[in-house]
Image (cartoon, grey):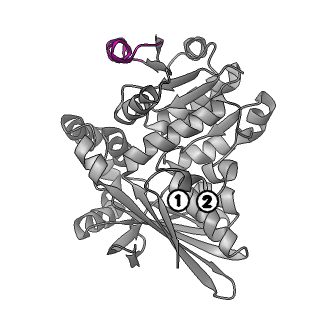
Amino acid sequence: MSKAILIYGSYGYTGELIVDLAVAAGARPILAGRSADKVETQSALHGGEHRVFGMDDPDLLIRGLEGVGTVLHCAGPFSHTADAMAEACLHVGAHYLDITGEFAVFESMKKLHARAQDAGIMIMPGTGFDVVPTDCLALHLKNRLPDATELTLAFTGNDKLSRGTAMTMVEGLAQGGLIRQNGVLTEVPSAWKTRDINFGEVTETAMTVPWGDVSTAFHSTGIPNIVVYMGAPPGLQRAARMSRYLGWLMAMAPIQSLLKGRIKAGPAGPSDQEREAGRSLIWGEVRNADGKSVESRLLTPEAYALTAQTAWEIAKRAAAGNVPNGYQTPASAFGADFILEFPGVERTDL
């Protein structure tokens, strides 16, 4: 397999962070995307090969991946783009990686497991903050209490969003919440539950969210009941509850266009100073049928800074052939301690 790594959507907010990290380490990934001006400008700055192609034509997409061994896909919303890119990777025999946190994408990619094994490639969505640290914490908790039947995860500290993340959240306004119950993905209302969670440095009120871990943690641990919470101020909690009744309105094309226009007019994402100063706090608990429970916490760098580190590390491992084939999550491929390999990450068992 070719060791060439192609980063698609390389000029997006997170894609650019990954490219900067890779180039600083002496690597020259292939830069790619649909905008010729943006790809060429980025390539002129960093050097190395670049390619311009969209994702609408499967044949052109396949030709765009010619000679590539690993694709790190950074162009979301991934509910629109992941399937096409994964199919192209299966066709050319390239590992597929992305940085999504969308549960529907994880479920879709999971269905490609057998085909990926036959093709000799790994398919791993969620190589960034969504869901590397939470997935590793979930498996760590499972290892601490092997007969666990319930898993609860929570995170906070991610106050600044990139445009891509915000766009994805806008598209999901009408979808409501999601948990895993008795092994089955189950719809619940937005902000279905709230609870105060002690993250160590702070105690915050958090609300349930349809995070990717309702899919990935089940694959990594086999725990049948999974709920994910996000620290949220009162205003955001109220807005989430209101979406139960106004979701149909939020899904209308004019409202979507208005909200996305406001996002595009704002900053691309956290500034350099905000990423350097920021950090994320993660908490998890597992409980067995007898009521025994254990808790653990993670402290990590700011979410986008961590995403660049974890996504690039996984891409390097894939290019070197140091990954299992088929559909994988970060923890199923690299173990619960994978997250501890990155600077600034601390894990505490309670």
Q: Is residue 40 magenta?
A: yes
Q: Is residue 117 above or below residue 245?
A: above
Q: Amino acid at mark 2?
A: Ala
Q: What percent of the width, then of the height, locates residue 144?
A: 66, 74
Upstream in the sequence, badge 1 or badge 2?
1
* First to last magenta residue range: 34-48
Q: What percent of the width, then of the height, locates residue 227?
A: 52, 68
Quadrant of the image occupied by residue 162: top left
Quadrant of the image occupied by residue 254: top left
Q: Amino acid at mark 1?
A: Thr
| 5 horizontally vs 174: left or right | right
Label 2 Cα crowd, 10 Å radius (few <14 / some 14-19 / many 20+): many
Q: Is residue 282 above or below residue 34?
A: below
Q: Is residue 268 visible?
A: yes
Residue shown at the point (38%, 14%) measured from the top left: 43
Q: Any mark on residue 134, and which?
A: 1
Whether tag 1 and tag 2 are in contact, CB under 8 A, the answer is yes
Helix, strand, or loop for circle 1?
helix
Q: Nearer the viewer, residue 257 or 261?
A: 261
**Which residue is disc 2 drawn over?**
217
| 299 horizontally vs 247: left or right | right
Gap in angstroms between the C-alphas marked 1 and 2 = 8 Å
Residue shown at the point (36%, 30%) measured from the top left: 12
| 315 horizontally vs 267: left or right | right
Helix, strand, or loop for circle 2?
helix
| 154 horizontally vs 274: left or right | right
Q: Any mark on residue 112, and which?
A: none
Which corner quadrant holds the N terminus? top right
Q: Nearer the viewer, residue 14 or 63?
A: 14
Residue shown at the point (24%, 40%) measured from the top left: 263
Q: Is residue 214 visible?
A: no
Q: Is residue 83 above or below residue 234?
A: above
